[in-house]
Amino acid sequence: MIASNHQKYDHFLVVDEVHSTNDLLRSLVDAKQVDFPMGYVVSAQYQTAGRGQIGNSWVSEKGKNLLFSILLYPQIEIKEQFLISKIVSLSVVSILKEWLPQEAANFSIKWPNDIYYNHKKIAGILIENLLLGDEIQNSIVGIGLNVEQVDFPSNLPNPVSLRQINDQLSYDKDLMIEQIRDKVVFLLQHSDELFFRNQLNTAYLSVLYKIHEYSFFSDKSGVFRAQITDVLPDGRLMLETEDGEHRFYYFKEVSFLPHCVEDENLSL
């Protein structure tokens, strides 16, 4: 993995351009030449091949947004891996609320871990785990957060940036990365406490996009109307249809249809 014009700080590597911050950090960790600490960050001004969930891409204008990856050592079992998703997404939302307290109620998490402002996507998260037996040896968490960009490609359905939300603030991108990293590490270090985990789950559900609102969804059987009622510890989304049926889905097994309206010819 080749990165150009890089600077190395304590627990922080800044590169000008790279294929993917996740890939670069993974290559550094796998090389085993240095014992990288918990919370080590690789940040880039631009990614030539930024990745999102399940093969999606992450598009960002050079130097405008946050593009970074964090190294974590979760010490949790594979069956608990969704806990990492909760921690990271809650950390991002928490820091955004600190920067824009007047807009706090408008930030939410779209299952499993996209960050939304109202009905638009402001950040994406990609978590890649290295497994060892039944446990996660380490995790690399990639985060893309729209900060200064105001012009987006037309094929992106619903992007928004901090600059578009409030153009009066001065956004310190390095500080934001440090704040998000520190929040993630803090929450992860306390995640072995049962009471704390229950608090995380409550907090996650409290900011979950469209929870307890009837919306249209699509699965392999077709389109239906339901409400989100819960997210299970393994990450499955729990939906309740209008007739009281409970349905459970892993990521990519169901699609949310935000612009779908009821039609007399629509089969539910």
Image (cartoon, rainbow, N blue to C red):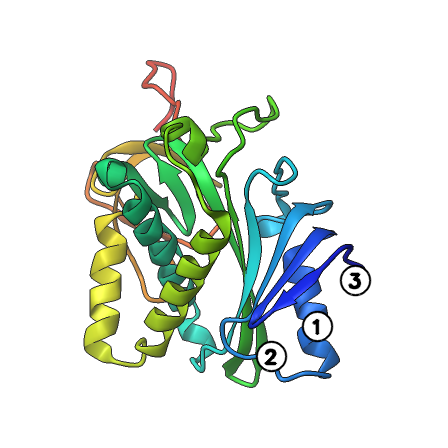
- Check the image and report above or below for 123 versus 127: above
Q: Counting other residues with Cα less than 10 Å from the Cα at mark 3, is it few (<14), some (14-19), or many (20 or more)?
A: few
Image position, residue 41 (x, y; %): 56, 65
Q: Earlier in the sequence, mark 2 or mark 3?
A: 3
User: Would residue 222 be seen by someone viewing this image from the given angle?
Assistant: no
Q: Counting other residues with Cα less than 10 Å from the Cα at mark 2, is it few (<14), some (14-19), or many (20 or more)?
A: some
Residue shown at the point (43%, 41%) measured from the top left: 171
Three-letter amino acid code of the residue under disc 2:
Phe
Three-letter amino acid code of the residue under disc 3:
Met
* Circle number at residue 1: 3
The residue most toward the top is 264
Q: Earlier in the sequence, mark 2 or mark 1?
A: 1
Residue shown at the point (70%, 77%) measured from the top left: 30
**Label 2–label 1 contact, CB within 8 A:** yes
**Label 1–label 3 contact, CB within 8 A:** no
Closer to the camera in the image, 143 or 230: 143
- Check the image and report above or below for 259 versus 182: above
Image position, residue 124 (x, y; %): 49, 46
What's the distance in space between the residues labelled 1 and 3, CA to CA? 9 Å
Q: Quadrant of the C terminus?
A: top left
Closer to the camera in the image, 44 or 25: 44
Three-letter amino acid code of the residue under disc 1:
Leu
- Check the image and report above or below for 3 versus 134: above
Q: Quadrant of the N terminus?
A: bottom right
* Circle number at residue 36: 2
What's the distance in space between the residues labelled 2 and 1, CA to CA? 9 Å
- In the visual, does 175 lie left or right of 1? left
* Circle number at residue 28: 1
